[in-house]
Image: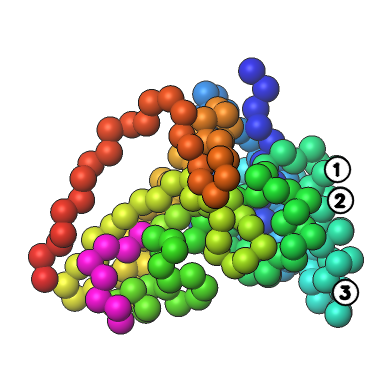
Amino acid sequence: MSKLKLGVLISGRGSNLQALIDACAAPDFPAEIALVLSNKADAFGLERSAKAGIATATVDHRDYPGDKPAFEATMDASLRKAGVQLVCLAGFMRLLSPWFVGQWRDALINIHPSLLPSFKGLDTHERALAAGVRFHGCTVHYVRPEMDEGPIIAQAAVPVLPGDDAHSLADRVLESEHKLYPHAVRLIAEGRARVDGDLVRIHGPVPDLATLTNPPI
Ligand code: GRF
């Protein structure tokens, strides 16, 4: 069986990239990373990729001042040349234009550190604490031109615990991200997560999921 070829877009530390690298190392995982693309030459995720023997490319947005179309066309060409079939945003900190998003419609996914549609944008953990929510988490979704919108593929919830600050909450969410992203990629690679209008339908069995109850306050 041929594996789904992933292109992973990063800007920084790349811990979600690492989770994908580790998942792809399992012989029965249905996807492989064809290219890691960064918009920053010093992104730590590039070192992780090199260590794993994965091809990398840097397309620095600062080399394209005022010319986002050229920046994105270069990224697009690089991904296509590597034979990428699914683009995974993993801490990629540039907003993508409707053109790029359209080029990769239903083949472009993102992981966001909140239970969407709550807390789109930045500083999600601070805002979750300020809102007093009892559950927080992360979401993997198909990308649409509007930021942090698009059909939801998978979510993981974590409790907000007494005494949490943004760091402890972020750590708990990040741990769940590292499980959720490979899970979502697997569902897509197996052809089991299919876009149906604004929703994603999951076909076939899903693992038993533990039910979270409201944490003590
Ligand atoms: C993660 O929290 C992810 O959800 C968000 O950016 C962060 C990237 O972290 N989109 P890392 O680079 O994967 O460690």
Q: Which residue is mark 3?
A: 67
Q: Nearer the viewer, residue 165 or 113?
A: 113
197 to 170, vertically: above or below: above
User: Would you say residue 136 sits in the magenta stretch?
Assistant: yes
Q: Which mark is on residue 81?
A: 1
Q: Given the image, on which type of amino acid does mark 2 rest?
A: Ala
- Kindly identify the residue that appears in the image at 22 percent across and 66 percent down: 134
Residue 131 horizontal/vertical position (percent): 30, 78
- Kindly identify the residue that appears in the image at 52 percent across and 30 percent down: 192
Residue 168 horizontal/vertical position (percent): 30, 70
Distance from the alpha carbon under mark 3 to that under mark 2:
16 Å
Residues under numbered marks 3 and 1 in contact, where contact means CB atoms less than 8 Å apart:
no
Q: Given the image, on which type of amino acid does mark 1 rest?
A: Lys
Q: Given the image, on which type of amino acid does mark 3 rest?
A: Asp
Q: Quadrant of the N terminus?
A: top right
User: Would you say residue 25 sits in the magenta stretch?
Assistant: no
Q: Which residue is mark 2?
A: 77
Residue 85 horizontal/vertical position (percent): 72, 38
- Kindly identify the residue that appears in the image at 74 percent across and 41 percent down: 84
SS category of the residue bearing label 1:
helix
Q: Quadrant of the C terminus?
A: bottom left
The mark closer to the camera, 3 or 1, is 3
Q: Residues within 10 Å of mark 1 (few under 14, many from 20)?
A: few
**Numbered range of the magenta stretch:** 130-137
Q: Which mark is on residue 113?
A: none
SS category of the residue bearing label 3:
loop
Quarter location, residue 11: bottom right
SS category of the residue bearing label 2:
helix
- Kindly identify the residue that appears in the image at 64 percent across and 58 percent down: 144
Q: Horizontally, is 49 left or right of 20 in the view?
A: right
Residues under numbered marks 2 and 1 in contact, where contact means CB atoms less than 8 Å apart:
yes
